[in-house]
Image (spheres, rainbow, N blue to C red):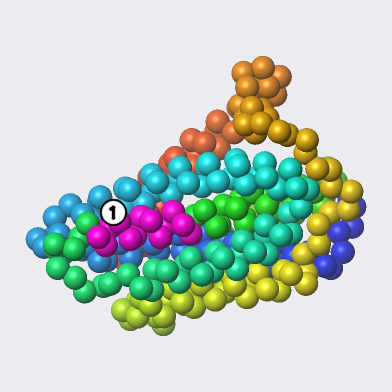
Amino acid sequence: STRLGGRIWGSVLLCGLIGQIAWIIENMYFATFAQDLFEDVSKFGNNYYVATTLMVILSALTATVTTVFAGALSDKVGRRKTFITAGYIVWGFTIMLFAVIPVDFDSGKSGMVIALLVVFDCIMTFAGSTANDAAFNAWITDITDGTNRGKVNTILSVMPVIATVAAIAIAMFTYDKGNYAAFFIILGVIPIAAGVVSIFLVKDAPGIVRSDMRTAKDVFYGFRPSVVKSNKMMFVCLTALCLVGISQQTFFSYLINFVQ
C-alpha cells in the first residue's frame, strides 16, 4: 500500500480521536446532562423526554444540512485544513457553552433551560459537522487511495471506543461528582488544543481539485435519481448505514443511564 508518512498518520490519529471524543459528548453526555437536570419527574413532568427528543431530532437535522453544505463549500474553495483547524477550535468553545446552563432552577424556567440545551447542542453540532463530518472525512479521502484507505478507516473506526473510555474517565472525576461545568470546560479545551496543533500538523493533499459548482443544484447532485440509479450499490450501502444510524440514535442518548 502507498506509504502515508508520520505527519499524515499523526494528523489522522489526532483529529480522528479528538473528533470522536467531542462527538461522544454530543451523542451521550449532552442528553444525559438534560436527563439529570429534569430527573425529578414530580417537579418537571415529561421534560426529561422532551429535552432529549428535541436535542436528538434538531441536532441530527443540523448535522445533515451542515455536512452537505460545508462539504460542498470545502470542495468549492479547494481546502480542508482551514475548515478542520478553525472548526475544531470553535467546536471546543461550543462545548464550553454547556458550562453556563443553570443546574438549579424551578419548573417555571424549564422551557428556557430546554431551549438553551437544544440551541447550544445545534451550535456545537454545526461546528463539529463542519470540522469533522465534512472537512476531516473529505481530507481522509484526499490523502488516501485505494491501497491504504481501508487501513486508515479501520483505525478510525476504533477511535469511538477509545474516545468513550477517555470521556468516561474524565467524567468520573468531574461530571459524576456533580461538577458539570468543569467537565464541559475540560472537554472543550481538548478540541481547541487539537485545532491549534492541527494548524502546524495538518496539510492539504497536493493537487486537490477545486469544484466548479455554482448553484444549489450542483450541491444536491448526489441526490438526483439518475445519479442514485447509476451508483445503485453505493446507495444500498448508504441506506443500510442510515438504518444503523437511526437505531443508534434511538438508544444512544440513554446509554449512560442504562449502564448506571
Q: Can residue 165 be seen here?
A: no
Residue picked out by circle 1: 51
Residue at the front extreme, as displayed: 214
Residue 118 is covered by the magenta coloring: yes
Q: Can residue 110 be seen here?
A: yes
Q: Position of residue 180 (x, y in %)?
A: 36, 76
Q: Amino acid at mark 1?
A: Ala
Q: Position of residue 26 (x, y in %)?
A: 45, 59
Q: Nearer the viewer, residue 239 or 154?
A: 239
Q: Residue at x 59, y 72 (%)?
A: 192
Looking at the image, residue 121 lies above or below residue 56? below
Residue at disc 1, secondary structure: helix
Q: Nearer the viewer, residue 248 or 231?
A: 231
Residue extent of the magenta highlight: 112-124
Count all numbered tags in the image, as a single digit: 1
Q: Which SS does the magenta portion mostly show?
A: helix
- Relative to residue 257, is residue 19 drawn left or right? right
Q: Residue at x 73, y 54 (%)?
A: 80
Q: Residue at x 54, y 69 (%)?
A: 92
Q: Nearer the viewer, residue 116 or 181?
A: 116
- Relative to residue 111, is residue 179 drawn left or right? right
Residue 120 is covered by the magenta coloring: yes
Indicate the quadrant containing the C terminus: top left, top right, bottom left or bottom right.
bottom left
Q: Nearer the viewer, residue 202 or 259?
A: 202
Sort mark 1 into few (<14), some (14-19) or many (20+) by Cα contacts within 10 Å. many
